[in-house]
Image (cartoon, coloured by chain):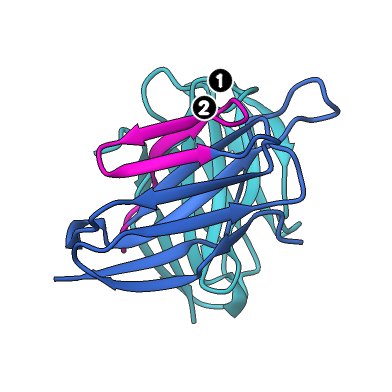
Chain colours: A blue, B cyan
Amino acid sequence: TQLLEQSPQFLSIQEGENLTVYCNSSSVFSSLQWYRQEPGEGPVLLVTVVTGGEVKKLKRLTFQFGDARKDSSLHITAAQPGDTGLYLCAGARFRDGSGNTGKLIFGQGTTLQVKP
Amino acid sequence: DSGVTQTPKHLITATGQRVTLRCSPRSGDLSVYWYQQSLDQGLQFLIQYYNGEERAKGNILERFSAQQFPDLHSELNLSSLELGDSALYFCASSVESGFSYGYTFGSGTRLTVV
């Protein structure tokens, strides 16, 4: 069972365009993170969001955590070829409502290609 | 360099064999996580250790086992290998065991079973 659904799975755009990647679940998460992975490398943490409704910005990237802590979005403004990569969302869940193990559940990822 | 070291980077072995993957966490991190990444399954959680003790288990096969040593490095043992075990295996580390603020991943070990 895939608890985190990412969409779209693939995205190919021209340099300068804007895009949004979505991460949805029917489950509540205690925190949600976004990672970027390049071929042959491990995922690199971009951001962690914790509070429902929270918005964080990292240069041209804007991350939002849904009010109910079940979904998140990543918006990239004026995409550049250097943004190309696999974007992964990952959620940490509470265990029995009293705390979690730190284990993360990953979405399937969104492969982004930005053409010059 | 993320600070998490995984060896070897590549491994090619035959079906039925046994291999050991090694991970050294980032300095100061007590928690180690193992993940398997394949094209059709994405990143799947295998197992977590915190300060030498198993903390959480995911979809880890009985043929697979892991441990974390007193110096905090961890090893993932894969035995009776099958073609379907071919994948990227990642180790990640974090300071805490509970509430997760994020992992630091290693570069992975690419396992090919032939």
Q: Which residues are magenta?
A: A38-64
Amino acid at dot 2:
Tyr
The quadrant in which residue A103 appears is: top right
Amino acid at dot 1:
Glu
Residue nearer the viewer, B64 or B104: B104
Does any portion of residue A42 appear in the rendered image? Answer: no
Q: Residue B91: percent from the left, percent from the top?
A: 48, 44
Badge 2 marks a residue whose secondary structure is loop
Q: Is residue A66 above or below residue B108?
A: above
Label 2 close to label 1 by CB (< 8 Å): yes
Q: Which quadrant: the C terminus of chain A?
A: bottom left
Pointer 1 local density, CA inside 10 Å: few below 14, some 14–19, many at least 20: some
Q: Chain of mark 2?
A: B
Q: Mark number for residue B80?
A: none
Q: Is residue A54 left or right of residue A14?
A: right
Q: Which residue is mark 2?
A: B101
Residue at 40% over, 50% down: A75
Q: Residue B30: percent from the left, percent from the top?
A: 52, 21
Q: Is residue A4 above or below residue A46?
A: below
Q: Mark number for residue B96?
A: 1
Separation of disc 2 and disc 1 at Cα? 9 Å
Q: Is residue B72 left or right of residue B81?
A: left
Q: Is residue B97 left or right of residue B91?
A: right
Q: Residue A52: percent from the left, percent from the top?
A: 62, 30
Question: Is residue A47 magenta-colored?
Answer: yes
Q: Is residue B6 above or below residue B50?
A: below
Residue at 73% over, 55% down: B59
